Image (tube, grey):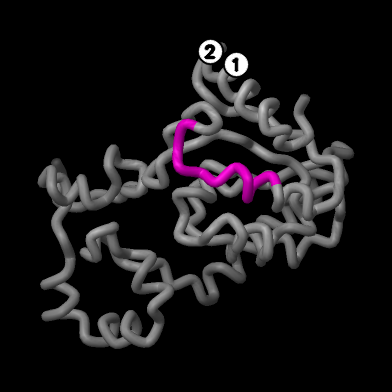
Amino acid sequence: YPDIIEYTWTKYPGGAGAAINDGVIISLDDLIDSNAPNLKKLLADHPDIDKMIKDTSGHYYCFPFLRGGYLDNWAGVCAEFYTSLAEQYQLGIFIENSQDLDPQPIRELMRRIPDERIGVCLDFGHANYSRVPIQGWFDALGDRIGYLHLSDNNGAFDDHLPIGEGKLDWEEADRLWRGIGKDIPLTLEVGGIEGVERSLRYLKERRYFEME
């Protein structure tokens, strides 16, 4: 392996802790403690940021992305681009939470886009392995959610399991969807025809998302 790796370690099989145990990356605990007093204080003062860069065993595996002015610039550039694209081609555009650990970037983007043709595609699977509970994603983005992607996982990375075969709380997901109060298209993103059939059976038996 190279000396420095940039990667989404939450998608490593078993998560970041497994990557440390496998010797692919090293824990940053001692390095931060000995060589980064300013970062150490920031993490102590902001437990939400501290949690974002730890694995499930509590070991640091990366440095935080402290957004600041970068986020403002990114949101402004993207807002201008998507607005122009929607206007030029008369499109409906839905921005998906892809590898976002929390809803702040997409929320800031939506705040800059009044055009209702542009909204959010909420991927339940991605939200489930983020650092924010699914309720938090709906609280931040609910009024702009206009499309849904459905798949299940075990909370560590993007397994694309059939619905009901992971750890995602689908009763809560259904409740949050109903709370939006509008008809929203959805896509099942699970592997293979059998996975789709098992997912549909699970949803229909419980009448989640009004499936019958």
Q: For residue 168, which numbered disc appears in the image?
A: none
- Identity, as a three-letter code, of the amino acid under mark 1: Glu
At 23% from the left edge and 60% from the top edge, which residue is drawn? 57
- Residue 22 placement (x, y as % from top left): 13, 43
Apparent side of residue 192 relative to residue 171 in the rendered image (left or right): left
**Mark seen at residue 194:** 2
The residue nearer to you, when weighing 176 against 106, is 176
Local crowd size for mark 1, using a 10 Å CA cut-off: few (<14), some (14–19), many (≥20): some
Give the crowd class for mark 2: few <14, some 14-19, many >=20 residues within 10 Å: few
In the figure, residue 208 lies in which quadrant? top right
Is 178 positioned to the left or the right of 193 in the image? Answer: right
Q: Is residue 202 above or below residue 121?
A: above
Element type where label 1 sits in the image: helix
Q: Position of residue 164 (x, y in %)?
A: 52, 33
Identified at 24% across, 65% down, the residue is: 58
> Which residues are drawn in magenta?
165-174
Mark 2 is on which residue type? Glu
Q: Which residue is mark 1?
A: 197
- Quarter of the image where the N terminus is located: top left
- Residue 145 pos. (x, y %): 74, 50
Q: To which quarter of the image does residue 90 belong?
A: top right
Instruction: Look at the image and say whether residue 131 sits in the magenta stretch.
Output: no
